Image (spheres, rainbow, N blue to C red):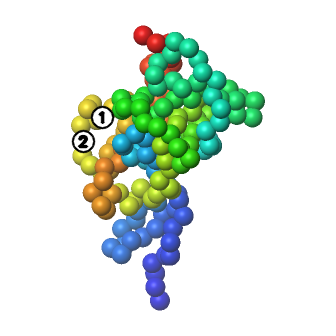
């Protein structure tokens, strides 16, 4: 009789071959600029295609405009530029990650592409000095192919003072 459970579902505990318990945690993989990010599923209220944006003059380059999503206005930001990267063109694979808390719309971030739902146990944690990580990045991981992924806390970003002040400096 095989005591090992079959495939896991996000949030369930399973035993691996060495019988130690591991937590399966589902995260959303995205690409923004040249970087890869892992985002907790609980940080994202919805993923949408890019609608027509109402431009807002005299704002920071990372603030792209306002989107009306079913009667709620969201400030839409270029995630890569907001985190210090260079602007990149968006395409049909680009999406907006909407962030909301309860009934309050907090904002949206455009990413260049969705890289799928991943299990955090597929990655190895990279030891890093937390003080040197950019704002909103809570950890760094490597996948089996050696690529670096940054775990991002979107709720921390939308509460950051920089995010709150979109007027061009």
Say which residue appears at 36% left-offset and 42% top-offset. Answer: 34
Quadrant for the C terminus in the image: top left
Q: Earlier in the sequence, mark 1 or mark 2?
A: 2
SS at mark 1? Answer: loop
Residue reaching furthest bottom?
Answer: 1
Q: Is residue 28 at all visible to an observer of this figure?
A: no
**Residue highlighted by disc 1:** 133
**Residue highlighted by disc 2:** 128
Say which residue appears at 38% left-offset and 61% top-offset. Answer: 122
Q: Is residue 165 left or right of residue 52?
A: left
Check the image and report above or below for 87 versus 127: above
Say which residue appears at 68% left-offset and 26% top-offset. Answer: 73
Q: Which sits in the foreground, 29 or 9?
A: 29
Cα–Cα span, label 1 and label 2: 8 Å
SS at mark 2? Answer: loop
Q: Which sits in the foreground, 136 or 25?
A: 136
């Amino acid at each position: 009789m095989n005591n090992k459970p079959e495939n896991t579902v996000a949030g369930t505990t399973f035993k691996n071959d060495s019988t130690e318990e591991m937590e399966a945690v589902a995260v959303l993989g995205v690409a923004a600029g040249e970087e890869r990010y892992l985002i907790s599923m609980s940080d994202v209220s919805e993923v949408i295609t890019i609608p027509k944006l109402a431009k807002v003059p005299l704002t920071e380059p990372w603030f792209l405009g306002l989107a009306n999503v079913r009667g709620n206005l969201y400030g839409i930001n270029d995630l890569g530029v907001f985190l210090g990267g260079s602007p990149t063109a968006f395409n049909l694979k680009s999406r907006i990650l909407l962030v909301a808390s309860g009934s309050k719309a907090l904002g949206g971030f455009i990413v260049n592409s969705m890289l799928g739902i991943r299990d955090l146990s597929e990655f190895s944690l990279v030891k890093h000095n937390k003080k040197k990580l950019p704002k909103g990045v809570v950890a760094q991981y490597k996948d089996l192919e050696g690529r670096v992924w940054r775990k991002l806390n979107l709720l921390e970003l939308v509460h950051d003072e920089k995010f709150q002040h979109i007027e061009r400096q």
